[in-house]
Amino acid sequence: MAPGPRSKDAPVPSAPLPDAAEADPALGRTIYQRVHERLRNDILAGRIPPGGRLKIAELARLYGLSQMPVREALQQLQGEGLVILSPNRGARVRAMDAAFIRSLFDIREALEGFLTRQAATRVTPAVIEQLRGIQRRYDAAVESGELRACSALNRAFHEAILRAAGNAEAIRLLNQHTALIIALRGRAGYAPGRLAAIRQEHWALVEALARGDGAAAQRIHAAHVRRAAADMLAMLRATAPAGCDATPTARRAAGG
């Protein structure tokens, strides 16, 4: 992991971005996305430390931008759970400790598990075939070591189940943390054998849904999420520098 800044009040030095926000709204949107991605990567890599202050004016100067795209990026990062915005204290990086990571998976287990149970009563044969097709492609990606494809197919698998539940508001709430879990998983990697276990868990879930057995589907999903959480925390502990609690490192692998 790259060393953090000398002071928690000092943002990471960065090359300026061309400020096109005022000149072209479409380009301005692109600039905002680039600021968001850069800040997000710096936080997840530990280059901006947990608890570090994020001063809008200073970040705007570093990036050579107006304050608006920086402010929008921080608001988006707050929605993802990476940043805390306080009226009187400004923006700070949230601590990425084990307790916070467990809370993300607890939310996923409760809310997504409920939706999975609902999906079992609403899923159609066409959706079951879609899930089987996604999982066959996931299996092939695991076999060939295509980890980016694994990440995309894993997300497609779970999203198809959530859509079948038909609760758009609950999905919106889940999506607030989905990108963060994927990013953390991408830096943690997987323990040996975890990808093979995911394949078995997914197939068991598909069969429970095909039977319309909501209780079984929820139990399988709960176990799936708990194993995912335990694996991620173990990998983050194994790769974190001494003195850091479950801090992500720069290892790259598939998604959550």
Image (cartoon, grey):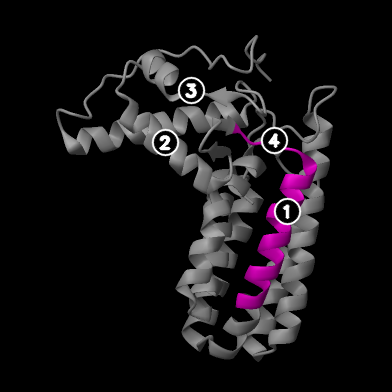
SS assignment for the magenta stretch, majority: helix
What span is colored magenta in the figure?
93-115
Q: Which residue is mark 1?
A: 103
Which tag is nearer the camera, tag 2 or tag 3? Answer: 3
Residue at image coords 80%, 49%: 231
Horizontally, is 102 left or right of 167 in the view? right
- Determine crowd level at label 1: few under 14, some 14-19, many 20+ residues with C-alpha closer than 10 A: few
In depth, the one of 74 and 126 nearer the eye is 74
Q: Is residue 109 magenta?
A: yes
Q: Position of residue 197 (x, y in %)?
A: 77, 59
Q: Which residue is mark 2?
A: 73
Mark seen at residue 55: 3
Mark 4, secondary structure of its residue: loop
Is residue 146 visible in this depiction of the protein?
no
Could you tell which of marks 2 and 1 lies nearer the N-terminus?
A: 2
Residue at image coords 56%, 37%: 83
